[in-house]
Image (spheres, helix red, strand yellow):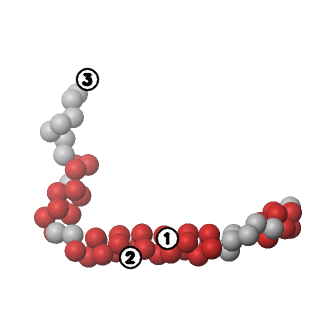
């Protein structure tokens, strides 16, 4: 089945750029995410990590 897909894709001109573009988007996303994690303020991380433990907004039935 893969040979049918591969043969079909080889007939499309300019198709070889799409894997490079997707790899570039993937790489840029994780570099930006890594940068955000490194530069995040400790206060913000503590606040966000305590959200699941905050029971003040829950209503009991």
Q: Which residue is mark 3?
A: 61
Mark before the other along the chain sequence, 3 or 2? 2
Q: CA distance from mark 3 to mark 2?
A: 45 Å
Q: Is residue 55 above or below residue 27?
A: above
Query: Dot 3 surroundings within 10 Å: few (below 14), some, or many (20 or more)?
Result: few
Circle 2: element type? helix
| Image-based side of 40 in relation to 32, left or right | left
Q: Residue at 82% across / 63% down in the picture?
A: 8
Which image quarter holds the C terminus? top left
Q: Residue at 17% across / 62% down in the picture?
A: 44
Mark before the other along the chain sequence, 3 or 1? 1
Mark before the other along the chain sequence, 1 or 2? 1
| Image-based side of 53 in relation to 28, left or right | left
Q: Residue 39 falls in which quadrant of the image?
A: bottom left
Q: Give the number of marks.
A: 3
Looking at the picture, tell me which residue is in the foreground, 15 or 29.
Answer: 15
Q: CA distance from mark 1 to mark 2?
A: 9 Å
Q: Is residue 45 above or below residue 32?
A: above
Which image quarter holds the N terminus? bottom right
Q: Is residue 42 above or below residue 55?
A: below
Q: CA distance from mark 3 to mark 1?
A: 44 Å
Residue 4's spot in the image, x, y percent? 86, 63
Circle 1: element type? helix
Q: Which residue is mark 2?
A: 31
Looking at the picture, tell me which residue is in the foreground, 3 or 48.
Answer: 3
Q: Which residue is mark 1?
A: 26
Q: Residue at 76% across / 66% down in the picture?
A: 12
| Image-based side of 42 in relation to 61, left or right | left
């Amino acid at each position: 089945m893969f040979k049918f897909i591969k043969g079909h894709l080889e007939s499309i001109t300019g198709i070889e750029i799409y894997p490079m573009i997707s790899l570039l988007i993937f790489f840029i996303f994780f570099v930006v995410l890594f940068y955000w994690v490194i530069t995040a303020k400790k206060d913000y991380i503590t606040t966000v990590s305590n959200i699941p433990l905050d029971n003040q907004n829950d209503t009991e039935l």
